[in-house]
Image (cartoon, rainbow, N blue to C red):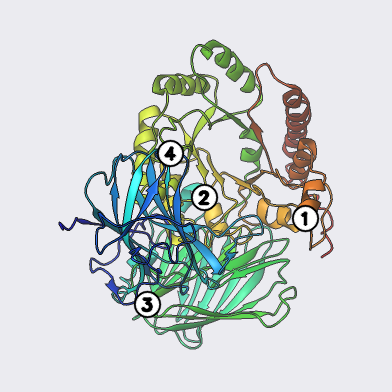
């Protein structure tokens, strides 16, 4: 039988491809096939969905499996309920497939599981996601048998395995499957970091209020001052003091590197970064107050917190610690598709609610350790009052005149037009995701032009992760943004999720690049699931700082207006100092007990829109005026115009008259 061309899709940490490409040498398959009966030679054994099995036409051997939804077009799938895997380990998924019609998409989902029957979760409401090593788009793979493969890896220490699901969506097709496998692979050893380039990134944080303000050397003692922090590094002793500058002037955390770091020197200094370099490591002090240490030798790091963490979250090896005034986070990094020894973490043994607790890491050689003090920039009070978002859509003809009148009315209260639903052609997908095609480019252009005439900014929807769903790289995503914005002349972006949310360094680089390109225009990020680990309660404030607005809490149970989740995750003041907005579809009036049931949740009283608006204003957060009616409905007039915008105007007047920040009125925390 003729052997088809091998197509390889690589996925680093189940996210879009990284901005820095791995070594050309490919991975070596080192493990046995972990998929039971991947060739269907034993019929349906091992497959929980009882797949069709044919005794003829196989790619290899005597039998093959079939997915067939040509009768009714409904999604069909073959499923192996649990394939055991190890965390922090690369695997290759491969299969042979042949399609008849080529309609719709064929997806391979490797859903992360903690144990058989136990989905790995990012929160009680959100699963930990999946790897998607292979996706066949419309028309791809029709005719002859072909082989497909892709690399995936989980960066969750509590991973137990995956549920393997192969299915058809958005089209009627008959797909033949054979030789399905998941095997462990080993990549070549990572080369040494190129120093100092490894800690110098694209983008200019100084253009967004975050800069290196000073750098001094006194022998082997270095003092680097950024907009948000002061770092004093004693290279001879191997210690560093990390002080917060915005909101409070205090030491937040002290680092001990387990001995001398060797002779260091300042080798690069501008407003964006100051780099210290020695024989085997480089330390980049970024203008946004992130410290990145690329090391070509093993490094032991012990951090002693000078604050009691009122919000403390760990997902090994990442850590986030916050109190009412600020905090710090730790985000180690290993380059994808390269082999390194890994970074291990020892959790604090002391009470993290009091100062003095310690956590430590062993950083493998040729890996990166990253530490950030926050907030990295000042809260922009002017922007918080002037940028007011209305979220609407582009309606088709013949309602253009009506929409134009509506937009003129909306512009009396809002200054940023967010174009969301209705902008894109969904076919053949059910959802708005890449590749993006505008439904009516002329109508879009006329709407943008009218909004600009009315003095409004225009921001347009994009789902960064969806590029990965159809095997389009992060570089493609960034270029698509540049070309599309240049063609239509709108101002900024609404991102439905961060770029590369499981690879914080790629997401960080992407946000720096996008911020550079849009300048002071609005970047609005909906990021309930956050880097570095696609979780709801653990996030990277130094990445958030590049957004203008954040939208958090979708589907999260919020236990009343006093829930700490609101203060330390949804709210941003004293953390990233981005403008916070809320998607409170599961916000409650009163807290539920810890062991609440689904029935308890169904019976709980949901917070009204008015209560959500009041809560966000009390935290100096903001809202988006979501899908106003035309003519305006009661909620538009009463909740938004008469209450929210009126209260925002009152707060703005108070701020302009006094020149003082508006106090945050945070209620008492929920008893745990």
Crowd tier of the residue under label 4, counting other residues whose Cα lies within 10 Å: few below 14, some 14–19, many 20 or above: some
**In front: label 1 or label 2:** 1
Q: Earlier in the sequence, mark 1 or mark 2?
A: 2
In the displayed structure image, the side of residue 458 where residue 410 appears, left or right: right
The CA span between labels 1 and 4 is 40 Å
Mark 4 sits on what residue? 170
The CA span between labels 1 and 2 is 26 Å
> Could you say which disc has been placed on residue 563 in the image?
1
**In front: label 4 or label 2:** 4
Q: Earlier in the sequence, mark 3 or mark 2?
A: 3
In what element is the residue under mark 3?
A: loop
Q: Earlier in the sequence, mark 4 or mark 2?
A: 4
Asked whether the residues under the numbered discs 3 and 2 touch, taking CB atoms below 8 Å apart as contact, a structural biologist would say no
> Could you say which disc has been placed on residue 243 in the image?
none
Q: Residue at x 75, y 53 (%)?
A: 598
> On the rendered image, what quadrant is the C terminus found in?
bottom right
Residue 312 image-quadrant placement = bottom right
The CA span between labels 3 and 4 is 40 Å
**In front: label 3 or label 2:** 3
Q: Earlier in the sequence, mark 1 or mark 3?
A: 3
Q: Earlier in the sequence, mark 1 or mark 4?
A: 4
């Amino acid at each position: 039988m003729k052997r088809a061309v091998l197509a390889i899709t690589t996925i680093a940490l189940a996210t879009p491809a990284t901005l820095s490409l791995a070594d050309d040498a490919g991975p070596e398959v080192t493990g046995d096939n972990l998929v039971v009966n991947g060739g269907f030679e034993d019929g349906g054994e091992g497959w929980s969905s009882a797949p069709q099995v044919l005794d003829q036409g196989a790619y290899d051997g005597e039998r093959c499996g079939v997915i067939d939804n040509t009768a009714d077009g409904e999604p069909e799938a073959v499923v192996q309920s649990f394939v055991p895997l190890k965390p922090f380990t690369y695997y290759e998924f491969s299969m042979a497939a042949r399609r008849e019609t080529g309609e719709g998409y064929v997806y391979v989902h490797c859903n992360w599981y903690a144990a058989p029957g136990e989905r790995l979760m990012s929160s009680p409401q959100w699963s930990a996601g999946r790897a998607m090593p292979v996706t066949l788009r419309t028309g791809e793979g029709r005719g002859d048998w072909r082989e497909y493969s892709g690399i995936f890896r989980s960066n969750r220490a509590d991973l137990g395995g995956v549920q393997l699901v192969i299915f058809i969506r958005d089209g009627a097709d008959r797909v033949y499957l054979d030789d399905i496998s998941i095997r462990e692979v080993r990549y070549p050893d990572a080369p040494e970091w190129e120093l100092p380039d490894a800690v110098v990134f694209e983008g200019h944080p100084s253009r967004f209020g975050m800069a290196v303000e000073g750098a001094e050397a006194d022998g082997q003692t270095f003092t680097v001052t950024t907009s948000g922090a002061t770092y004093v590094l004693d290279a001879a002793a191997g210690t560093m003091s990390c002080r917060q500058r915005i909101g409070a002037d205090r030491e937040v955390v002290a680092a001990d590197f387990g001995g001398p770091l060797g002779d260091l020197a300042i080798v690069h200094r501008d407003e964006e970064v100051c780099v210290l370099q020695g024989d085997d490591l480089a330390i980049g002090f970024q203008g946004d107050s992130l410290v990145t240490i690329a090391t070509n030798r093993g490094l032991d790091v012990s951090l002693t917190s000078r604050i009691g963490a009122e919000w403390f979250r760990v997902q090994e090896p990442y850590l986030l610690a916050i109190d009412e005034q600020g905090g710090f986070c730790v985000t180690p990094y290993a380059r994808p598709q390269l082999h390194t020894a890994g970074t291990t973490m020892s959790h604090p043994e002391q009470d993290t609610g009091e100062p003095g607790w310690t956590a430590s890491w062993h950083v493998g050689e040729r890996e990166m350790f990253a530490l950030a003090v926050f907030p990295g920039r000042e809260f922009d009070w002017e922007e918080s009052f002037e940028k007011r978002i209305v979220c609407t859509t582009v309606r088709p003809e013949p309602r253009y005149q009506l929409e134009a009148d509506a937009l003129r009315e909306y512009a009396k209260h809002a200054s940023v037009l967010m174009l969301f639903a209705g902008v894109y052609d969904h076919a053949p997908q059910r959802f708005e995701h890449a590749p993006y095609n505008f439904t009516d480019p002329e109508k879009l252009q006329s709407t943008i032009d009218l909004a600009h005439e009315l003095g409004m900014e225009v921001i347009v929807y994009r789902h960064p992760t969806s590029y990965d769903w159809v095997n389009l790289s992060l570089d493609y995503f960034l270029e698509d943004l540049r070309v599309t914005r240049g063609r239509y002349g709108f101002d900024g972006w609404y991102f439905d999720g961060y770029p590369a949310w499981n690879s914080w360094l790629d997401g960080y680089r992407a946000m720096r690049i996008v911020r550079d390109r849009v300048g002071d225009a609005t970047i609005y990020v909906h990021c309930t699931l956050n880097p570095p680990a696609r979780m709801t309660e653990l996030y990277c404030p130094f990445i958030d700082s590049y957004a203008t607005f954040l939208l958090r809490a979708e589907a999260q149970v919020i236990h009343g207006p006093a829930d700490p989740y609101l203060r330390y995750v949804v709210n941003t003041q004293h953390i990233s100092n981005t403008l916070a907005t809320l998607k409170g579809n599961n916000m409650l009036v009163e807290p539920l007990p810890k062991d609440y049931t689904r029935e308890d949740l169904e019976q709980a009283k949901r917070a009204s829109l008015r209560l959500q608006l009041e809560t966000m204003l009390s935290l100096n957060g903001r809202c988006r005026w979501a899908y106003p009616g035309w003519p305006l409905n009661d909620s538009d007039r009463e909740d938004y115009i008469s209450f929210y915008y009126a209260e925002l105007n009152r707060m703005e007047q108070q701020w302009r008259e006094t020149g003082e920040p508006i106090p945050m009125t945070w209620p008492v925390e929920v008893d745990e």
